[in-house]
């Protein structure tokens, strides 16, 4: 049987498939229909220090090949999470990746300190890339100095694997991956959603209350694959790839581009039972290609020029 396990810093995942933050709640919502322990990991909904309401509706819009969201990082806050959600996630055997958000570096650090004091947190995903909040977050993620500052500060307060989540809304994502690596990140995850907009042509008004939101789904996958490939050329730390993954072939594409693991988000809204076929499909791919470990696929895309099929006489 093929070995699907992968390592992200000091954390070992049973397989490379992680439920993406923001699309899987706190994991427990899906526990009646999904064996959380069978997933490589569960990246929970983003947490600020305190509870947060998010944006008013409408805040989700379907697009031809994905969706726009402007949830605004609504959440219960880290203190309620460690009291109400984390113990049950631990009991169910989930490998829990906690996505954390902040408006200041001090807030990021305090959340990391709180999580570091509680058993059951596998890693911290540092959200510095949400495109639909105005304060904090993406202000750090769109600045090389800001990325360095926040990653370096959080690195000092926790020994948990630290995974900055990078924005695609920059001109050179690889430079941000390098900045995160230099500041002490154990891995990077990418990409978060693309800033986008939809307009109701009858009312002539934006379809989202926030006017703009984040585009996810199959429409962004080829761009996300390219960005993972660019970052793989630039850093030595593991990469967690995401963006429009719907099946095992999509996941393999990211892995070949350089992702050690992948996150699946929007597709979960379409088919919440996709997880076992996706994980099983990875095993089938390895068997079909006579590979013993999924880790052997990472970055193995062949970009050499093909031999010409014919030559002129």
Image (spheres, helix red, strand yellow):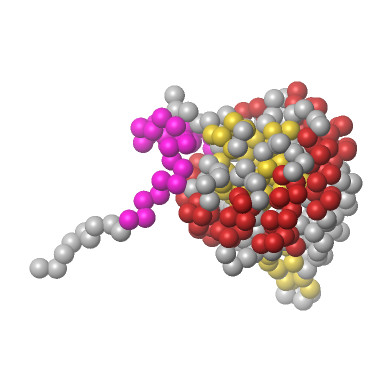
Camera-side residue of 227 and 308: 227
Q: Is residue 62 visible?
A: no
Residue sitting at x 65%, y 46%: 184
Q: What is the quadrant of the C terminus in the image?
A: bottom left
Tell me: 70 left or right of 167: right
Residue furthest to the left in view is 313
Q: Quadrant of residue 178?
A: bottom right
Residue sitting at x 40%, y 49%: 301
Give the image location of residue 242, x and y in percent: 59, 49
* In the rendered image, the vertical position of residue 146 relative to residue 204, given as above or below: above
Give the image location of residue 105, x and y in percent: 80, 53
Q: What is the quadrant of the N terminus in the image?
A: top left
Camera-side residue of 200 and 127: 127
Give the image location of residue 166, x and y in percent: 65, 55
* In the rendered image, the vertical position of residue 3 relative to residue 295, given as above or below: above
Q: Quadrant of residue 148?
A: bottom right
* In the rendered image, the vertical position of residue 79 relative to residue 57, given as above or below: above
Give the image location of residue 233, x and y in percent: 48, 54
Q: Is residue 125 visible?
A: yes
Which stretch appears magenta? 277-304
Tell me: 176 left or right of 47: left
Quick check: is 285 in the magenta stretch?
A: yes
Tell me: 287 left or right of 181: left
Residue sitting at x 62%, y 39%: 18
Residue sitting at x 65%, y 58%: 167
Quick check: is 89 in the magenta stretch?
A: no
The image shows a total of numbered marks equal to 0
């Amino acid at each position: 049987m093929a070995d699907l396990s992968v390592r992200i810093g000091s954390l070992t995942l049973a397989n490379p498939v992680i439920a993406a933050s923001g699309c899987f709640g706190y994991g427990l919502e899906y526990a009646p229909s999904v064996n959380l322990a069978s997933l490589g990991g569960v990246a929970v909904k983003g947490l600020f220090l305190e509870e947060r309401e998010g944006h008013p509706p409408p805040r989700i819009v379907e697009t031809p090949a994905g969706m726009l969201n402007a949830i605004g990082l609504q959440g219960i806050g880290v203190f309620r999470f460690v009291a109400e959600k984390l113990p049950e996630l631990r009991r169910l055997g989930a490998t829990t990746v906690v996505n954390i958000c902040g408006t200041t570096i001090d807030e990021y650090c305090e959340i990391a300190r709180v999580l570091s004091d509680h058993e059951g947190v596998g890693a911290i995903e540092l959200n510095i890339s949400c495109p639909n909040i105005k304060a904090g977050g993406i202000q750090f993620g769109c600045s090389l100095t800001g990325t360095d500052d926040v990653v370096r500060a959080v690195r000092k307060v926790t020994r948990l694997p630290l995974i900055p989540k990078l924005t695609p809304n920059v001109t050179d994502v690889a430079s941000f991956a390098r900045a995160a690596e230099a500041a002490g990140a154990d891995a990077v995850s990418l990409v978060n959603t693309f800033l986008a907009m939809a307009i109701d042509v009858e009312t002539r008004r934006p379809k989202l209350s926030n006017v703009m939101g984040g585009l996810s789904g199959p429409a962004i996958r080829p761009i996300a694959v390219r960005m993972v490939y660019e970052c793989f050329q630039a850093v030595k730390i593991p990469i967690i790839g995401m963006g429009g993954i719907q099946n095992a072939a999509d996941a393999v594409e990211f892995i070949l581009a350089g992702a050690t693991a992948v996150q699946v988000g929007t597709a979960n809204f379409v088919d919440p039972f996709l997880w076992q076929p996706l994980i099983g499909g990875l095993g089938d791919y390895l068997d079909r290609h006579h590979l013993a470990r999924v880790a052997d696929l990472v970055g193995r895309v062949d970009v050499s020029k093909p031999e010409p099929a014919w030559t002129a006489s």
